[in-house]
Amino acid sequence: MYTAKLKELRERIGLSKTEIAKIIGIDRSQYGHYENDYITIPIKHLVALANYYNVSLDYIFNLNQNKQYPKIKKVVDPKISGKRLKELRKEFKISQTNLANYLNTAFSTISSYERGINTIATNYVYAICKKYNISADYLLDRIDDPKYLK
């Protein structure tokens, strides 16, 4: 999904896994697990890497080839991303239960995202954006436009 892109970005600037791990404040083995797709990288670390490489999440996720967007925000606000998730659900007439079933998670997980209690998990962001052709940067409130991928 995106692990090859993380490796490509890191190697393009000639940094080791240890150096990148230090930049985002984790240990090398943990970063290695992310890059080798042994465990899913949390959104906060993925955003930190996108900020460091100065690229969009859409680019990292291979959703499109837009490396950058103007006026990109450096942080994710769970309240706004939750609001955007709820708006998306309503736009596509999807219940929380149906979205939870699609993502193979609990209804309460979707509810906690929409209330801004938790940031949407990386795999769920990717699955939602891929299915509904929505920008991950938009969904996570890093940009206001474009909403839809081209």
Image (spheres, grey):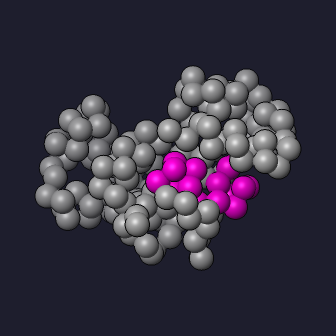
Q: Dominant secondary structure of the magenta stretch?
A: helix
* 71 over 30 or under it: above or below: below
Residue at 61% across / 63% down in the picture? 67
Residue 77 appears in view = no
Q: How many marks?
A: 0
Q: Eyeballing the image, is 80 above or below 102? A: below
Residue 107 in the image: state x and y as whole percent.
22, 38
Query: Is 19 on the left-hand or right-hand side of 101?
Result: right
Query: Is residue 56 a member of the stretch shown in magenta?
Result: yes
Please provide percent x and percent y for residue 2: 55, 41
In front here: 80 or 47?
47
Highlighted range, magenta:
49-63
Q: Is residue 83 left or right of residue 67?
A: left
Side (left or right) of 109 relative to 20: left
Q: Is residue 131 visible?
A: yes
- Image quadrant where one finds the C terminus: bottom left
> Toward the viewer: 82 or 125?
125
Q: Quadrant of residue 134?
A: bottom left
Identify which residue is drawn at 37% across, 53% down. 129
Q: Position of residue 25 (x, y in %)?
A: 75, 40
> Where in the figure is residue 78, as x and y percent of width and height?
45, 56
Q: Would residue 12 be counted in the magenta stretch?
A: no
Q: Quadrant of residue 66?
A: bottom right
x 29%, y 37%: residue: 103
Task: Please tell me which residue is depicted at 49% across the width and 58% down the height of the picture.
Answer: 64
